[in-house]
Image: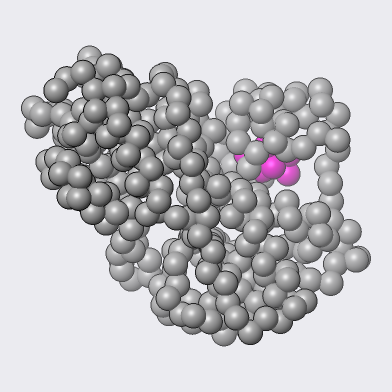
Amino acid sequence: MATLKDIAAAAGVSSAAVSRILNNDATLNVSLETRQKVLAAASALNYQKRTANVSKSTFSLGIVQWFSSQQEVNDSYYLSIRQGIEDFCVKNCISVVRAFKTDLNYMDALEHVDGIVCVGKFSKAEISRFTGLTKNIIFLDMPVKDIHISTITLDFEQAVYDALTYLEELGHRHIGFLSGKEYVEKGQLFPDSRKKYFVKYCKKHKLTYEPYLLEDTFDMESGYRMMKRLIEAGTLPTAVFAASDAIAVGAMKALSDSGLHVPGDVSILGFDDTALSAFTTPKLTTMHAPSYDMGSFGASLVYHMLKLKPETAMKVLLPCRLVVRESCRENVRD
């Protein structure tokens, strides 16, 4: 039987986008051509939509997303996490209640759920409100120090180490880092630990990074702006590590618009391994973040919390892996 991933591969889009198109999600902002490609692929593969048997469902799972629905459309990383959650729920006849933090009275929708998966970044006050609703709860993509709260996060320390080791082995000694800033409730900055590990690695290995470390937002426009600043400063690193594929794509566009080439003039390494990364020119070398698995594991853990009632929370670190494509090469400038 054809799956959403099969359709996504045939249509050249993410599985999360396929799901929303097949569910006629009116908030999804994609072109008519893309919708037609997905529908044609689904027809050609004889896709049959699976639906949960609600009458057999004995468990309801709330999904809280810190993004608005429109922001989620523009960030396939979080879309992929949600797809992992929902696919697990379909397979196990779990009813789903979705709530975006930007929705009015979104907490009301979660009052009667059996468990909650919180996706994204939340303040201490928000965490307290969620844990007050149920003990069957997990936070994805956000570390929580409370030993009573389960979390699944990415192993950023090892990921940064692997990325920079790869660039250093290619002979790069001047490496930039382009990242974004994320904020939780009341404008509180949520620090990106990748920056800390990046600086730590560069200092230990005596790499030059200070002139090339910039932060803006996690999108293509931000990547474009930050790379333009580096270009206009008159000196460029030989390689750039971007904290997201979106930032990396924007940076590549800025280099191209300035008559510079990737990887000839600057090597670019991204983070996430979104569907877009395999379709850039050149194809983007990136760190694969297992976002879909994070969602699936998160839903599974909450499901088993209800059954097993464990007294100990789980703190899970998921490894990332380097995906080598075409956007990095040996340093020939120094």
Residue at 35 percent of width and 47 percent of height: 160
Image color mode: one colour
Residue 74 in the image: state x and y as whole percent: 48, 42
Residue 324 in the image: state x and y as whole percent: 45, 28
Residue 226 in the image: state x and y as whole percent: 23, 37
Is 216 in front, or is 73? 216
Camera sees residue 66: yes
Magenta span of residues: 17-23
Residue at 39 percent of width and 36 percent of height: 270
Type of secondary structure dominating the magenta stretch: helix
Residue 318 in the image: state x and y as whole percent: 52, 55
The quadrant of the image that shows the C terminus is top left
Q: Quadrant of residue 33?
A: top right
Q: In this view, does 27 lie to the left or right of 229?
A: right
Residue at 48 percent of width and 46 percent of height: 320
User: Is 260 part of what is drawn in magenta?
Assistant: no
